[in-house]
Image (tube, rainbow, N blue to C red):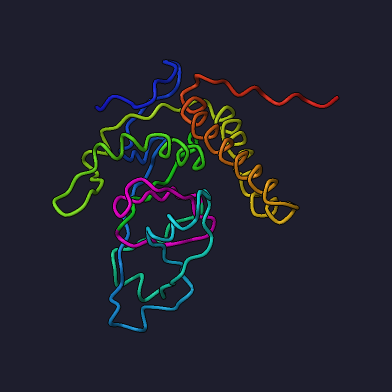
Amino acid sequence: MAEPYLRCPPSWKRATLAPDPSGDLVVRVETGSTPSTKRPEYWNGDIPWLTPKEVTDLEGSVFVSRTARSITKEGLASSAAKLMAPGTVMLTKRAPVGAVVVNTVPMATNQGFLNFTCGSALLPAFLAAWLKANRPYLDLIANGSTYPELYLSDLFEFEIAVPPIDYQHRVVEAINSFQIVLAMESSLEQLTASPDELHLVHAKVRKLRTLRETLLPLLLSGEVAVPAARKRR
């Protein structure tokens, strides 16, 4: 078993990334496939079909609901692709390594992904954030003769530490708060009245991105605690 990149409290539940159908963390891992491009009847259907490049184009968004291309039921059946249920954590294993999203609609992927189905004790958004924070480890174990690639035999040895589900919700909410503010950047740009104000907006957004990247591993390792929200009286 590989040592975890993030040091977490010993009380957190631990397991490897290897799928365990009888467990409650990672219960299933699938890869994707590409139907034959020579068969037009396999394409332009109603099944979204994701590629790694589309993930990198999302600019930090965690969730994906649309894809550039789609396949038909015949295309799905003709290939090794699987129709993944909403809430699947989709990790790119090559070109690039380590980009991650969570689908919000049933979706298939090409062969450049490892698709994780979470059990009842693991939130998909928490696993996605955890994989992002562990990007240095993913880059380290990626190998290949032509280009870097993640292989299941290496990835499945890696240990994940998972806090209780209520704490996972609090961590995800904290991460989402950063993302909401960062998503407002383009709107704030339109409201600026001068180049100096625009420069100030960009500077603040850069600081916020740096803060997010600094806090992410601390939140996911328990080094920085996320307090429970106070109940309104």
State the residue lying farthest toward the right.
233
Q: In which quarter of the image is residue 78?
A: bottom left
Return the x and y of residue 65 as percentages of the image width and height.
54, 60
Residue under the point 34% across and 54% down: 113
**Is 101 in the magenta?**
yes
Q: Which of 108 and 98 is in front in this view?
A: 98
Q: In which quarter of the image is the N terminus?
A: top left
Residue 206 to residue 65: above or below: above
**Is residue 137 or residue 213 the one in the foreground?**
213
Q: From which residue to which does the magenta span run?
A: 87-111
Q: Residue furthest top?
A: 10
133 on left or right of 62: left
Can you say which quadrant of the picture contains the C terminus? top right
Q: Which of 202 and 113 is in front in this view?
A: 202
The magenta stretch spans residue 71: no
Q: Position of residue 47 (x, y in %)?
A: 46, 69
Q: In this view, does 18 lie above or below 36?
A: above
Residue at (47, 55) in percent of width and height: 85
Q: Is residue 187 above or below residue 20?
A: below
**Going 41% across and 15% down the picture, which residue do you hit?**
10
Residue 7 shown left or right of residue 231 in the figure = left
Question: Picture coordinates of residue 223 (x, y %)?
Answer: 50, 19
Query: Residue 181, image x and y in percent?
Result: 65, 43
212 or 73: nearer the viewer:
212
Q: How many marks?
A: 0
Indicate left or right for 194 with 127 as reference. Answer: right
